[in-house]
Image (cartoon, rainbow, N blue to C red):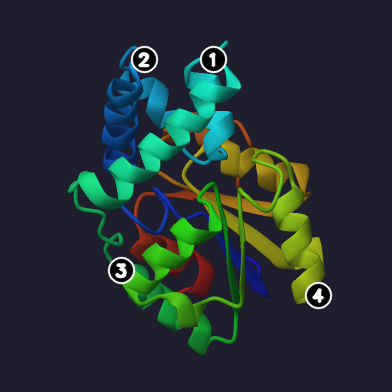
Amino acid sequence: MKNYKLVIFDWDGTLMDSVERIVSSMRSAAVDVGLPIPDAEKVKNIIGLSLPEAIMTIFPGCTDENVEQLVLAYKKQYVTVDNTPTPLFEHALELLEKLKQDNRLLAVATGKGRNGLERVMAESNTNAYFNNSKCADESTSKPSPDMILQLLNELNVKAENAVVIGDTVHDMGMAKNANVDRIGVTMGVHTRDELSLFQPVAIVDSLAELSSVLLGD
């Protein structure tokens, strides 16, 4: 495995075990605004997209007003109502610490908005590990390469010296579109078979295994 200079993490389903809270919050938000409750698997498949794009995918044909209402209802559910636990995955802090000690640059490319990412980073005490981050409300949604290209430019890293870590086909597509290597993790949304369609350099089942792949420990 290359000694990648820059490691770019997705957040939900990759570093944080938050998939079930996202699903339950979106389903409850639909009830709040009077829309049909979406199937849980349909919600899982949009994780990683920007929130407006995710909503339009789940509810095709919904109006701009519906999207705005759902965005507000979802945020309220996720932040203040839903109490589904969202811990970091096992070995997440250990992995981040080892990567920093190995002088890797670390970044996040997420479907979360900026306020949401900053909140969960503060709650999980992970801010200090990351050199940069890009969010869906300040970039084009995955699978556009926009977030990755911005990170490469701002951190002055060539594409061949970076790797993207993610749990969804949206993450893998974003990395492929940016001509950046990618590693799939199976703890989140999509399966090994789905991730493998994007020719990742590796697919792992835990962050401990990811540590072995990236650091050889």
Q: Nearer the viewer, residue 205 or 30?
A: 30
Residue 80, how many percent across, how many down? 26, 51
The residue depicted at 58 percent of the width and 44 percent of the height is 171
Residue 24, how many percent across, how many down? 26, 33
The residue depicted at 50 percent of the width and 74 percent of the height is 215
Q: Amino acid at mark 3?
A: His
CA gap between label 2 and label 1 equals: 10 Å
Q: Nearer the viewer, residue 106 or 103?
A: 106
Mark 3: give few (<14), some (14-19) or many (20+) Cα within 10 Å. Answer: some
Q: Tell me whether the residue at label 2 lies in contact with that at label 4, contact meaning CB atoms closer than 8 angstroms.
A: no
CA gap between label 1 and label 3 equals: 40 Å
The residue depicted at 21 percent of the width and 44 percent of the height is 82
Judge depth for marks 1 and 3 and give the one in front: 1
The residue singled out by tag 1 in the image is: 62
Q: Tell me whether the residue at label 3 lies in contact with that at label 2, contact meaning CB atoms closer than 8 angstroms.
A: no
The residue depicted at 59 percent of the width and 68 percent of the height is 107
**Mark 2 / mark 1, whichever is N-terminal:** 2
Q: Which mark is residue 156?
A: 4
Mark 4: give few (<14), some (14-19) or many (20+) Cα within 10 Å. Answer: few
The residue singled out by tag 2 in the image is: 35
Q: Amino acid at mark 4?
A: Asn
SS label for mark 4: loop
**Mark 4 / mark 3, whichever is N-terminal:** 3
Residue 162, how many percent across, how many down? 69, 64
The residue singled out by tag 3 in the image is: 91
Query: Considering the image in quadrants, where does the N terminus appear?
Result: bottom right
In the image, residue 123 above or below residue 189: below
Q: Amino acid at mark 1?
A: Cys
Q: Tell me whether the residue at label 2 lies in contact with that at label 1, contact meaning CB atoms closer than 8 angstroms.
A: yes
CA gap between label 3 and label 2 equals: 39 Å
